[in-house]
Image: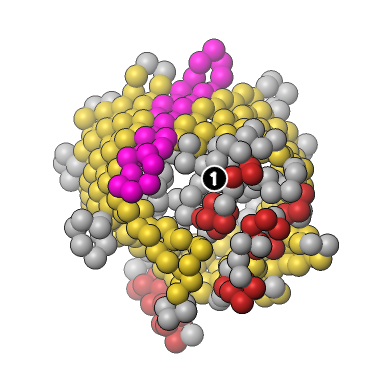
Amino acid sequence: MKSLLSIFLLIAVMSLADEQVELFGYYEPQMMGADVKDQWYHTFSNKLRIDLQSTIADNIHFAANFDYITYHGRTTWNILDFTSDEITNQVPEEVRGFYIIPFADRHFLDNAYAKIAFKHADVILGKQQISMGTGYVWNPTDIFNIKDVLDPTYEQPGHNALRLDVPMGRFRISTLYSPEDTWEHSTKLIQFKGGLAHFDCSLVFIDKIWRFHDYRFFDLKSLSFLEVPERRRLYGADCVGELLGLGVWAEYAFNEMQISDDFYELVVGADYTFDFQTYVMFEYYRNTAAKSDYREYQLNDWMRYFTTEQKAVTHDQLYALVQHPVTDYILLGVSTIYAISDNSVALVPTFYFSFAQNMDIFAYMNVNYGKNGTAFSKTQGNGLLVRGRVYF
């Protein structure tokens, strides 16, 4: 609590001492609930986000974001409650309590970086947003973030990195270094991006240590699952543009693995807005690291998916979205995630209401239709999320 008060005091002093410091942010209450094995549980959270930015000189810009989040209600969710009996039975009874996702109060510096614009290059240093790829739900070239398929547009966390952007007319070369304990363990990235006709395309190479876990083995001494890191080299490309009146995009990444089998990910998507303002979009995703037969899904597949160590548990998926503005303030929609490989579906109706200049509400339900053990099986239960925001 002392560190939290110190940060708020620092922010207040900075904003009062320098009129060039802009202070803004939002308060976000949220309720997340799920029907788990015929029992309804819910978690409530309160999030306060403080943003500040300042142009220190003509060529130097500073920005930072601080988040403070409290959780209430059910604050521990056991992942085994969402898996089939075949998966649960693989786990000894005495260690099933370790397969939980905890929601603990936290406060943290989400972003804090300085951008320095030189004559021929821009340098960004610090904890910053790193967004890769053109996909809406899935991004094969993004090794920093994994989106929630039910809520893919929610903000992503910052990452520590040193970034260099060198513009060359319609083209740009970017390099990025995200430090770990040694040079060999640190993430290195180089991207070449430019415009071709009606398309913006890029090529990217990333070298990273992929730190995932083997959830079959729990170390009682360290109170953690066995970490199995390995080197991952990604060779990717993406494109976005317009074709025959449609917005179209594609993204591909081949992953060369040090120990595991090499795999690739592919995204292809398109969208269109009709004259009567209805918006439609679809996106196809393939991940060859995932299984194509749901009877082959293993404990590690589910755990790495739920803990966001990998993007998918199933080989092929299709996402579709339809949205329509009912009024100037209300937007209704419905999205569908279809797991082609195991023939399961999640239906997600959405609701957005902007009822004041600086206030809005977003909500969705998810209803699963699928056999036991599939990606969106009925046994996983159905869910609800309601989120409000008050901007200041």
Instruction: Work out whether residue 285 can be spotted.
Output: yes
Above or below residue 63? Residue 45 is below
Q: Is residue 48 left or right of residue 162?
A: right
Q: Please identify the quarter of the rendering in which residue 371 is found.
A: top right
Query: Does the magenta-highlighted stretch encompass residue 244?
Result: yes
Q: Residue placed at 34% from the left, 23% from the top? A: 195
User: Does dot 1 land on a helix, a strand or a loop?
Assistant: loop
Q: Is residue 49 left or right of residue 232?
A: right
Instruction: Work out whether residue 356 can be spotted.
Output: no
Report which residue position mark 1 lands on: 312
Q: Residue 297: x and y, percent? A: 59, 48
Q: Residue 246: x and y, percent? A: 56, 19
Q: Nearer the viewer, residue 327 or 79?
A: 79
Above or below residue 188? Residue 95 is below
Magenta stretch in the rendered image: 238-264
Q: Residue placed at 38% from the left, 46% from the top? A: 260
Q: Please identify the quarter of the rendering in which residue 346 is found.
A: top right
